Image (tube, rainbow, N blue to C red):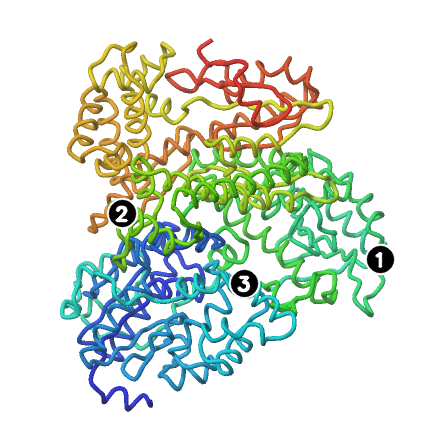
Amino acid sequence: MSEAAHKSAAKPLILIDGSSWLFRAYHALPPLTNAQGQPTGAVFGMANMLRKLLRDYSPERICVVFDPSGKTFRDDLYADYKATRTETPEDLSAQYPAILELVDALGLPSLTVDGVEADDVIGTLARAAAARGEPVLIVTSDKDMAQLVDERVHLLDTMKNRRLDPAGVFEKFGVPPERIVDYLALMGDNVDNIPGVPGVGPKTAAKWLNAYGTLDDIIAKADEIKGKVGENLRAHLDQLPLARELSRIRCDIALPLSLDELTPRTPDAERLAALYRSHGFNRLLEEIERGEAASEEVAPSPPPPRESPATAVTTVLDEAALDALLHALREAPLICFDTETDRLDPHQANLVGLAFAVEQGRGWYVPLAHDYLGAPAQLDRKTVLDRLRPLLEDARKPKLAQHGKFDMNVLAAHGVRVAGLTHDTMLQSYVLDAAGNRHDMDSLAQKYLGHTTIKFEDVAGKGRHQLPFNQVEIDKAAAYAAEDADITLRLHGALYPRVCAIPELKRVYETIEMPLVPVLARMEQTGVKVDVGLLRTISSELATRMDELMAQAHAAAGSEFNLGSPKQLGAILYERLKLPVLGKTPKGEPSTAEDVLEELASQHPLPRLILDWRALAKLRSTYTEQLPQAVNPRTGRIHTAYGQAIAATGRLSSSDPNLQNIPVRSAEGRRIRQAFVAEPGNALLAVDYSQIELRLMAHFSGDARLQQAFREGRDIHQATAAEVFGLPVDEVPAERRRAAKAINFGLIYGMSSFGLARQLGIGRGEAQEYIDRFFGRYPGVKAFMDATRQAARERGYVETLYGRRLYLPNIRSKNQSLRQYAERTAINAPLQGTAADLIKLAMIDVADFLQQKAADIRMIMQVHDELVFEGPAATLAALAPAIAARMCRPGGDRSSPLSVPLVADWGVAGDWDAAHAVSGHATSAG
């Protein structure tokens, strides 16, 4: 249909896939920020996209639909649904509240339905409108939506200005809309982790559906399909019905708004002006203030141009050039360096080249291992490293890098131990605004220098055809690498003065973040040993136990069924066993979710068997089968990567693999920790802070009763139970202590009376009564929370004990839910952030202590509030009390930084799990 034709037709109901649009706006635009350094690019993109759509279509009915946070009904169908998805970037999450504010201020109806994805909300609205004979336009780029297309329902991709009717769907996918679900089921979806048939892509899926008809027809005639792909099909027939159900958009969701309530309101000019002003959208603000119509311009204005000359590149290919480089490095007050490798794992990567910069505008590149056909002769890598080693290993020679820990690890693998890393532009950006900045070099160059860098794809290509760096032509590689070093040096000139302008941030940068880099680098280089044989044994045992549970479940059910099928399980529970329906899926079917099964477990043995089976299945697939694959073949150990500039609160993260999610609550989960072992003759020491965030609450709040409980060494949950429920401390029953524990931790994380009621299985009124009693007995906590909210509203940020800041752009939002979330963050962030600062300071101090006293003891893991060490068993046991004691006085302080004692429990054993059997305690009070 032509553009003129659709504008002359009846105005369609417009349904915007807000989550899809949000991601596209974020990835399509540069990382714009406002004057406070808060990210604004996605908000700006959404504002322009919405304004253009409204201008082009002048809709009489419209709705912007967003995905909810948390699980949806598809997680009930398949526990691993979307399990492989990466987390939403923090600088995008930070913009989400402002986007909701934007939509509402523009007068647009919006929907976010708990437990239901945006696709299903859109599908329900589209089908309802089509049933009334009305045209519908779904604004999305999601291929899954093609299943909704018919003569009345069309798709619109505004980015590509492409509209899909039924003929357009067939042209694009090779199948009609009514076969899209079967098409998706055959291919599966790596993004959503939907299982399909290995080896089946778009062409094969379309070919089969056109040849056989439907997915059911393909299943029925699977024996006729030849070759490897036919074998794959037959091997995966049992999962195709699940894949189809996961891919199908549901169109019968109960919604809080009707079609007739989707009429747009008059935009709120005052709210829009405030939003545009706070985000620095000056052109949009001028339009509001002049009362003008929306501008035709859609693309954002670039940052103000700054002087950013191209990098002058010197390629070092002979001894004379190397001599000149070495002379420049020796004379320089600060050396910026960067490594180029053939892969991203620094512990297995080969060093392909080195880049340096010592003055802005010029960079040097030393190619060492470019081996494409026709590559010019290069200097010997060992010879170059030997000549550079005295400079790189000289702690008195200041050095600069962008994400220098990676470069330190690469060079360590090639025999060079970098010392003197004084500055890191990634960490400068992180300290300035952890949640408001992207911290990669390309984004920082655009933001602070107005400079668009040469991208890796520009020199190495994209996708399947991307070259490893050793195959990139040296001229291209030199331009890319030398610019990286030069831009890093320029960024240091722009960022470091900003850090120094705020004394508290300068202290965090210089006494916490930078000294931690070499500590983390050594930990990553050391890695941790795992007993692969034990993991395989545990995996086999889990499989055997799962088989036993399956047999018991079949016996309890009275027949065989697929334990992984919610539909079959539901039929057994509710139709055969006649158990009560305690919850329903959004489609109205009886639920088999975990919380429902927990409630049903008291009435029949089958639900508990299913819960146990699911728990073991997750342990096996996530840990015992995957951890052996993470063992480095060169070292025989697992080398995780600690993310130092990820979490907004300052906490470290762990990836590839994530060692901070190893389960500890179940016996089977703890057994997995038994596979983390010491080398022969060595032992492991685990030191864990005791209830550190509750101790920090006592410190920050100054509450006399809470502080007294910690100073007297009482069980804090028992003490809280005694205070809240009016019981003698020695007469507190176990269920009251559990309730008190839920209250203690719940308040730190901003839990409401509704959340507490659900956790404890009590009424909401009773839960609120517990909370009121808590605040009545601990008034200092209530006063601290109120004061923190007020201070955050006044300043726009909160701080840790050591001065780390977290900015809260929504703390003054008119949107109640956004403001309340920011208020909860304001209370929690100083606690979590201070805990992060404390353990980082402890890591720095203990690492220095061990280098001086016992170099054969190595710090090998950091997991939340715990540090794990490996070393000779006798030495480790002798020094364990001293290590734990230093952790209670982080930074080497002789007194505790808190007004209540810090306590650390420690244990020594041959494996990680056994090391959690507490052998001793250390406290800052002693």
**Tag 2: residue type?**
Lys
Q: Give the residue pinned by disc 2.
A: 578
For the point 57% across and 53% down, the residue is 490
**Tag 3: residue type?**
His
Q: Give the residue pinned by disc 3.
A: 236
Foreground residue, 272 or 775? 775
Foreground residue, 418 or 100? 100
On the rendered structure, is 780 left or right of 646? left
Residue 255 visible to the viewer: yes
Residue 91 rendering spot, x and y as whole percentages: 41, 52
Q: Give the residue pinned by disc 1.
A: 318
Foreground residue, 369 or 126? 126
- Mark 2 vs mark 3, foreground winner is 2
Q: Secondary structure at mark 1?
A: loop
Task: Name above or below for residue 306 compared with residue 830.
Answer: below
Instruction: Give the Cα separation between the discs numbered 1 and 3.
Output: 58 Å
Q: Secondary structure at mark 3?
A: loop
**Tag 1: residue type?**
Asp
Residue 431 visible to the viewer: no
Is the N terminus in the top left, top right, bottom left or bottom right quadrant? bottom left
Task: Name above or below for residue 389 compared with residue 803.
Answer: below
Q: How dense is the environment of label 3, judged by Cα within 10 Å: few (below 14), some, or many (20 and up)?
A: some
- Mark 1 vs mark 2, foreground winner is 2
For the point 65% across and 69% down, the residue is 228
For the point 44% across and 21% down, the residue is 690
- Mark 1 vs mark 3, foreground winner is 3
Residue 907 rendering spot, x and y as whole percentages: 56, 19
Instruction: Give the Cα separation between the discs numbered 2 and 3.
Output: 32 Å
Q: How dense is the environment of label 1, judged by Cα within 10 Å: few (below 14), some, or many (20 and up)?
A: few
First of labels 1, 2 by sequence position: 1
Residue 45 rendering spot, x and y as whole percentages: 36, 66
